[in-house]
Image (tube, coloured by chain):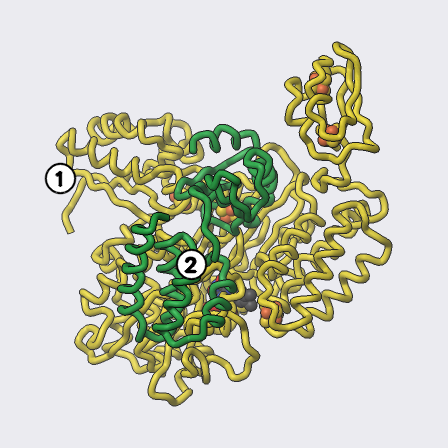
Chain colours: A green, B yellow
Amino acid sequence: MSDAAMKENMEKLEDFIQKHKNQKGALIPILHEAQELFGYIPEEVQKRIAEVLHIPAAEIFGVATFYSRFTLTPRGKHTISVCLGTACYVKNSKGVLERLEEELNVKTGGTTADGKFTLEATRCLGCCGLAPVMMIGEDVYGKLVPDDIPDIVKKY
Amino acid sequence: MEMYRSHVMICRGTGCTSSNSEQIAKNFEEEIKKHGLEKEVVVERTGCFGLCALGPVVIIYPEASFYSMVKPEDVEEIVKEHLVKGRIVKRLLYAESVEENRLKALEEVDFFKKQVRVALRNCGIINPENIDEYIAFDGYKALEKVLTKMTPAEVIDTVKRSGLRGRGGAGFPTGMKWEFASKSVNDQKYVLCNADEGDPGAFMDRSVLEGDPHSILEAMTIAGYAIGASQGYIYCRAEYPIAVKRLGIAIGQARLYGLLGDNIMGTGFKFDIELRLGAGAFVCGEETALIASVEGQRGMPRPRPPFPANKGLFAKPTILNNVETYANIPVIFNKGPEWFASMGTEKSKGTKVFALGGKISNTGLVEIPMGTSLREVIYEIGGGCPNGKKFKAVQTGGPSGGCIPEEHLDSPIDYESLAALGSIIGSGGMIVMDEDNCMVDIARFFMDFIVDESCGKCTPCREGTKRMLEILERITEGKGEEGDLDKLESLAKNIKNAALCGLGQTAPNPVLSTIRYFRDEYEAHIKDKKCPAGVCKELLNYFIIADKCKGCGICAKNCPQQCISGQPKTPYTIDSSKCIKCGVCMQKCPFKAIIRK
Ligand SMILES: Cc1cc2nc3c(=O)[nH]c(=O)nc-3n(C[C@H](O)[C@H](O)[C@H](O)COP(=O)(O)O)c2cc1C
Ligand code: SF4
Ligand code: SF4
Ligand code: SF4
Ligand code: FES
Ligand code: FES
């Protein structure tokens, strides 16, 4: 993220914080907003939230690490989420995930060396009718077999 | 509302949306305009119709033509033929819905025949982003009746008489829960909706939220009146962006219409609802954890008592109900508690929605009266296992439930019967497995999920489930030992008795139920080092079929272990003792000459 973009996002987040700081239980909505804006929750953002909400930074860290949706490190340009929910698992979504690990040469949870893809496993994307399913960014791919993977990855 | 001669209903549920139904809707609008039919034909974006595997789905009324697997490029033809000339496009119809050149009514199609849609009554029928359509289908009528004609005690009595039990898993009687909270005296109380839908492989609540969000708002407002609360929160998974968006729109519209706010319907009753997003933690579906999360803390359960009805959100009396539980509430007031109680069994009243998935022909959402048999759902509605495979088990209740084998398929679906089989109704996930699924691997899969999601607060769950997972991993890797099953059973017993919350207390169920019904499969892994279903990688061997091998040598070049050898043009062989079972050879063989068994 460029410095200018960083600054702009900081300002947007500041607005959001100011608007919500007096609401009960504001911390999680603010973390959602930060995750959305930055793609992760940078340390300086944690510090800023701690200041405004008068919560110890350690507690913010504790909350942010408890929930899997919040991440503390930057992600690749595209996030690939392979569904390992039950409906997908029984239809071999694990085979799809393993094929991705192999094609991209990255372990689940990791980001490729070129920073292009972050590969993750997720639980139920809610389109179990299309199992097995994966998402790349906002695009959904359903009824997959491992052999579909190379061609799909090439599109990005 | 305006009158149109035709209604084109396009599914914008998650399944169909991900296969491009918005583009289809846009194409319809464009084509309809091109033919000057805007005043005669209306395009409606609806929630899920239930048959997601056939998506994108488009239904055109009044004929009720069920078009399945529609592509954006098909739209031109449908408009030209069906809407302009009145000729149904047969090649795109859902095959099941056609019979000897006659179009069956939707209710006659096998998939829909046995269903009774109560919680899903509006899904696929109304446009969820338009409050007027909800109102046109009796929406907010129950709220009006409650606020103008009933006392809170009468409201609670009605819910009690309906026999409605919680649809989120535990099956606690809803009316009783409301009564406890109503008796708690306090200046502030809260109404919560659990829309965290954590069971992986289940999407009932999602479909209600996306297809009929106002029914939840109406029901929560009724609950608020009943217990004396003025504020509600919906805790919805962030992984459901369409649901979040539609709930937001619905709340905005309800406020505009005076159906939420300071003076609802001019009666002086005050109630408002806010939306809170979950952040990817299964345990937050547990009520005390959910409350902690809404408060902005880590979502960890706490011991009960005190029960939320006395001390819940922000330490005030609180009720929490599941989405589907709420979806039933308005109908109970519109049609009467006796009507509701006339469906179902002695102790389980009404209907239940299930997300049917896995190895089944008709994956999708089904709503059936309680007491319907598992067999009817799986075979008559679901169409059985595809590709001629043999049914092995059905998993209900997700990570808290169990696997039920063929011999118990005639059992009725109700809270008590499924519990007696070692499973639960749960929130409504129903995943079918066939002969190609390994039950030990499935048990391992759920335990892996639990270990991932355990919040770590209490030792039996944190450590005990890890021990169970280690044993299951060993078994699936061919390192199982005599006595492993006893160890699993005794760990399971300890965890069930000592864990603090429902997550730990129910976590051993998938393991226990698979040991109960599929002991021989465990033993094959432990004693014979074989996986009968051919799933557990470490127990399989790779073979080259001599007849099919052309001796190209590609496999040998790619094998990381250098354990394939042979002479060009003659069949190659694999040295199993060195093989690490990576599967590369099988992938690379251009002649499909390598098999695994
Ligand atoms: C680990 C765990 C996860 C749960 N997840 C959910 C869930 O995702 N949705 C839900 O409605 N209830 C869930 N429950 C059940 C809730 O704790 C609670 O019983 C329910 O929301 C109450 O509503 P009901 O009476 O209408 O079912 C879960 C319980 C446990 C122990
Ligand atoms: S049983 Fe498990 S999830 Fe529940 S409180 Fe204990 S450690 Fe946490
Ligand atoms: S599975 Fe892997 S290690 Fe075994 S023979 Fe094939 S390529 Fe070699
Ligand atoms: S790649 Fe297939 S055909 Fe070629 S040598 Fe190996 S097994 Fe035989
Ligand atoms: S289990 Fe994969 S989408 Fe539901
Ligand atoms: S999402 Fe379209 S039918 Fe279910």
Q: Is residue A124 visible?
A: yes
| Residue appearing at x 30%, y 51% in the figure | A4
Tell me which chain the residue with mark 1 is part of. Answer: B
Q: Where is residue B178, by image quadrant?
A: bottom left
Q: Nearer the viewer, residue B136 or A144?
A: A144
| Residue appearing at x 46%, y 72% in the figure | B297
Mark 2 or mark 1, whichever is nearer to me: 2
Q: CA distance from mark 2 to mark 1?
A: 53 Å
In this view, B532 is above or below B412: above
> Which residue carries the number 2 mark?
A42
On the rendered structure, is B73 left or right of B438? left
On the rendered structure, is B495 left or right of B4? right
Q: Nearer the viewer, residue B467 or B160?
A: B467
Q: Where is residue B524, by image quadrant?
A: top right
Could you say whether the residue bearing mark 1 is in a helix, strand or loop? Answer: loop
On the rendered structure, is B553 left or right of B15? right
Q: Nearer the viewer, residue B314 or B438?
A: B314
Quadrant occupied by the C terminus of chain B: top right
Q: Is residue B351 visible?
A: no
